[in-house]
Amino acid sequence: MCASMRPGSTVMPRASIVLATARPSNTPDGAISTMRSLSISRSAGCAFVPVPSKSDPPRMSVLPNGRPLPSGMCAHSRTTTIANGVGDAFRSATEMVRSLRSRKISAAELLAVHADRIARHNPALNAIVTLDLERAEAAARAIDAAPVETRGTLCGLPLTIKDNLNVAGLRTTAGIQAFASAPVAAHDATVVARLRAAGGVVMGKTNLPPAASDYQTTNAIFGRTVNPYDPARTPGGSTGGGAAAVAAGLSPLEIGTDIGGSIRVPAAYCGIYGHKPSETLVPRDGQVRDFPVPNPAKVGNVQGPLARDAADLELALDVIAGPVAGEDIAWRLDLRRSRHDRLAEFRVAMLPPIEWLPLDDEIRDAFDWVASTLSRLGARVGVAKPQSFGDLREYFRRHIVTIGATLSTAYAPALIADLARRSADDEFAPGLFGGMQASVRDYLIWLDEREAHRGSYRSFFTTWDVLVAPISPVLAFTHDDRPFPERDLVVNGTRIPYNRLGVYPSLATHAGQPATVFPVRLSGSGLPIALQAIGPYLEDRTPIRFAQLLGREIGGYEPPASYA
């Protein structure tokens, strides 16, 4: 707290204090351990100038009361901005940008609002694991000093990045313990560079499971991230830290990654919006545990946004989408408008039940309620799916085997054999482990099959505009630390294998389609219920716009009570 903030108080004389780094209660001992010495100066009313540290990148420097105060930030910022409404941390990113552009709030003030919330709520949530608030504040002040017309699309909006994407000057761990002491990144991932160029202010990086390979978010470096609606439950994975941060009002915008639902499942479990872009729409470089091959050669994996409003997804997509360096010599982005701007104009296919996969009763009720609501609002609604889906067993099996092939270099043959042995009673597990040992010939055949499914989707979307489907067979589940082959889920009293969490995400991923997750309502126990809208390839604005229009009718995001 700055003494100059209180009426009648005087500015504190120059002094030196030590700020201890906060360690959330659910992180491993030693995960965050840096100490930082700051000086208090009279300049600018209450500026804090850090004594440079030569050790780790800055994490969460805090005052003795547990609240961070990065260089130049005064703790009164939140009070003054919340009072007039423009600093409300639960407003949409689009509204925040509007306030920044009209100068109702400065970028530095908006950053301080979020820094304050991070200080108060992140120790329990453990969503943001690396903070870069000192550089963020410098960036925010530079944006504030610039003419409005040069501030970029985001105009000083604070945001966070998943910790498997490179941010220059910060370490990228991907949740892998061996990377905890890796050198800091020398360059931004392309999406991060584009966000910065558009006036985005990177506050820090968010938690994920090791190698982004789980539907929960915990690792040996930073510990467990909890769900803001119920700390006994997972926020999902693998962009669980980012989804929890956005839902709890610690960040208005997160950039994550998705191949098996890693944007969409956390968005669903945390009651926010998330978008998996069309497979080739957004550059995919700068990701740890990814292959250094050209953008078109990557299969399945994408980078995309999570936010509290569907309009924010489009705001972010307009910044990060477009050809990668080299391809931009001949290509430019010309993303088609949404097919419709009124719900009544949409042709909505509702996915028929998957006979072999139970669906939670409350999710089924919400699914049916959305269908009836759309019909009532004038949309054309029917039950349909792409012809190539069949009963989805073989479709999911091919998705699993293709993912297995992309993971093949990350696992030793002995480990693959052991996992296969322990998963022998699961009909889909052999596909995963078979993919890990596949030949190049096998892989090329599978890619050809993917193209056939993409063609089936093209035919499907001549009749329909979006395909609405569940994104998970269950609501956010309780934390489960058992080995993968031993995990299961309970759906309406029936136990199903853990890997069935990948079925609904695969509907869009396996054919490279865009998909937007949208919140529907809260369950009887207060947990978010969400669905996904899958759209036509490279028509990402259509499912986003559909989710936005529907959100206006059914309510959209609801802040978690403990963080509101």
Image: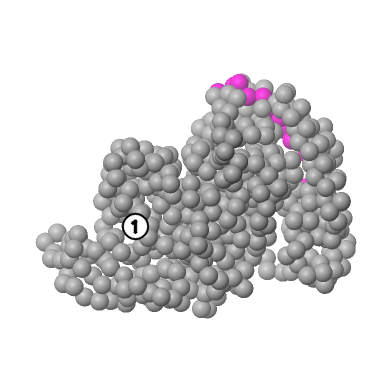
Q: Is residue 481 above or below residue 216?
A: below
> Which residue lies at the image location 29% right of the left edge and 45% below the top edge?
146
Direction from residue 431 to residue 260 in the image, left or right: left
> Which residue lies at the image location 60% right of the left edge and 41% below the top edge?
327
Q: Is residue 218 above or below residue 28?
A: above
Choose between 263 and 173: the one closer to the eye. Answer: 173
> Which residue lies at the image location 36% right of the left edge and 62% below the top edge?
134
> Which residue lies at the image location 72% right of the left edge and 69% below the top edge?
482
Choose between 197 and 463: the one closer to the eye. Answer: 197
Q: What is the span of residues highlighted in magenta in the rendered image?
A: 342-358
Direction from residue 495 to residue 307 in the image, left or right: left
Kind of residue at badge 1: Glu
Disc 1 on helix, strand or loop? Answer: helix
Pointer 1: what residue?
137
Q: Is residue 277 above or below residue 49?
A: above
Choose between 37 and 233: the one closer to the eye. Answer: 37
Check if residue 401 falls in the magenta segment.
no
Direction from residue 564 to residue 349 in the image, left or right: right
Q: How many neighbours does mark 1 have within 10 angstroms: few (below 14), some (14-19), or many (20 or more)? A: many
Residue 289 in view here: yes
The image position of residue 200, as x and y in percent, is 42, 48
Residue 127 in view here: no
